[in-house]
Image (cartoon, grey):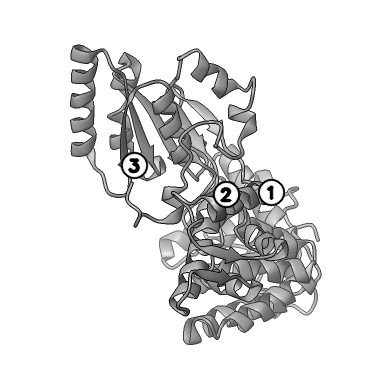
Amino acid sequence: MTKNAPLAERMRPLNLEDFVGQTQLVGPGAMLRKLLEADRVPSMVFWGPPGTGKTTLAWIVAKLTESKFVQLSAVSSGLKDVREVIAEAEEQQKFYGKRTILFIDEIHRFNKLQQDAFLPHVEAGTITLIGATTENPSFEVNSALLSRCRVMILEKLSTEDILGLVKRALTDKTKGLGRFTVKANDKTLEVLAGMADGDARVALNALEYAVDSSLSASNSNVVELSQDKIKEAFLKSHLLYDRAGEEHYNIISALHKSMRGSDVDAALYWLGRMLEAGEDPLYVARRLIRFASEDIGLADPEALNQATAAYTAAHYIGMPECNVVLSQAVSYMAKAPKSNALYRAYKKVQTIIADRPADPVPLHLRNAPTKLMKDVGYGKGYKYNPNYDSPVEQDYLPEGLKKEKFYEP
């Protein structure tokens, strides 16, 4: 590894003793540690947030088992790369008796055909597959492949874990920043560890940026880090928010439920989490339009006007100006009275339609544009409501549904 590699790469642990966190997997007596000690490593999927050690753990597994380690990224690799690795793994096994661990970063980005390519080789033991993903593998990894792998869940690192990594990086003179004199009080380092939000890579990248920018502004090897300097290093948001992934749906769900619960503050917070992370404002506006009818409906018909107006305004002015427009709409939805009567009514309609054969339209409600249709009774007996001063007694549902009630306020 070169000295010009990023700090997070240089500080990557090489053994389980230096590995931070995930004691539920690799701590004394933990499942994965037992498998490693018995040299019985299965194909696995490491599932967890960014910066929790998925790649590092795969490297350590390969080293402990003395396997050949091959890493591919699902973002930049294709079937051709996979086939080349498989062919080489077969040679390693045949001529040298050596296993190959194939590590696929962001395995959820491989399509079904690419994932299927691993199946026979995982079954035959040609490769031990380790996939890493930030997304729920139940949704993103083929069930056939997933059934042949053990899912290992990695948890977000604690603030104390991150703090330990940062202090180690500051004192390590070989791989870290120990060749410099970096002055930072405990409170400043705690701020850095907290802002990293459990992501070791983000913490070390921010630390390296803060130190490098301070060094470039001075002529000495002495650096004094302040909280402001740390916050500047985090200027670009590191919010966990993938517009195509599970967290996307978790946060829109949180927004929806906060509005339903009439919590304006929570609703505004979840709105901000989406918009500040780059969500399409029109996506949010479309969800508000749905919410206005699904959760408010006729309890406050003005909600739908607010939602559609917000969509139009967001379309006209875009981000960041439309953030206050969407804030207004979200706040209105949260404060409005709630009723899901329309939602329940339509769900009941859907159930009836799915469970029953298509009921014929009553003759008196049918359109009769021709004489033949009139002659057979289409439209006969229909009472034109505006011609009557009092409510008209008339059936509008098919014969078999006359007693059904769909809308119940």
Labels 2 and 1: the sequence-earlier one? 1
The CA span between labels 2 and 3 is 36 Å
What residue do we see at 33% from left, 37% from top? 112
Q: Position of residue 202 (x, y in %)?
A: 52, 57
Query: In the rendered structure, which amino acid carries the disc numbered 1?
Result: Glu
Q: Which residue is mark 2?
A: 168
Which circle, 2 or 3, is nearer the viewer? 2
Q: Which residue is mark 3?
A: 110
Specify whether 80 is left or right of 167. left
384 left or right of 112? Answer: right
Question: Are the residues tagged 2 and 3 within 8 Å (C-beta)?
Answer: no
Relative to residue 233, is residue 126 drawn left or right? left
Q: Residue at x 24, y 23 (%)?
A: 89
Tell me, yes or no, whether the two marked residues, 2 and 1, touch with CB atoms within 8 Å: no
For discs 2 and 1, the disc positioned in front in the rendered view: 2
**Residue 265's disc number:** none
Of circles 1 and 3, which is in front? 1
Whether 28 is drawn above or below 253: the answer is above
Res. 48 visible in picture: yes
Q: Please state the horizontal and vertical placement of residue 173, each as a whole percent of the image.
A: 48, 52
Q: In the image, which disc is placed on residue 160? A: 1
Crowding at mark 2 (Cα within 10 Å: few <14, some 14-19, many 20+): some
Give, as a three-letter code, the residue at label 2: Arg
Circles 1 and 3: CB distance less than 8 Å? no
51 vs 219, nearest the viewer: 219
Location of residue 390 (image quadrant): bottom right
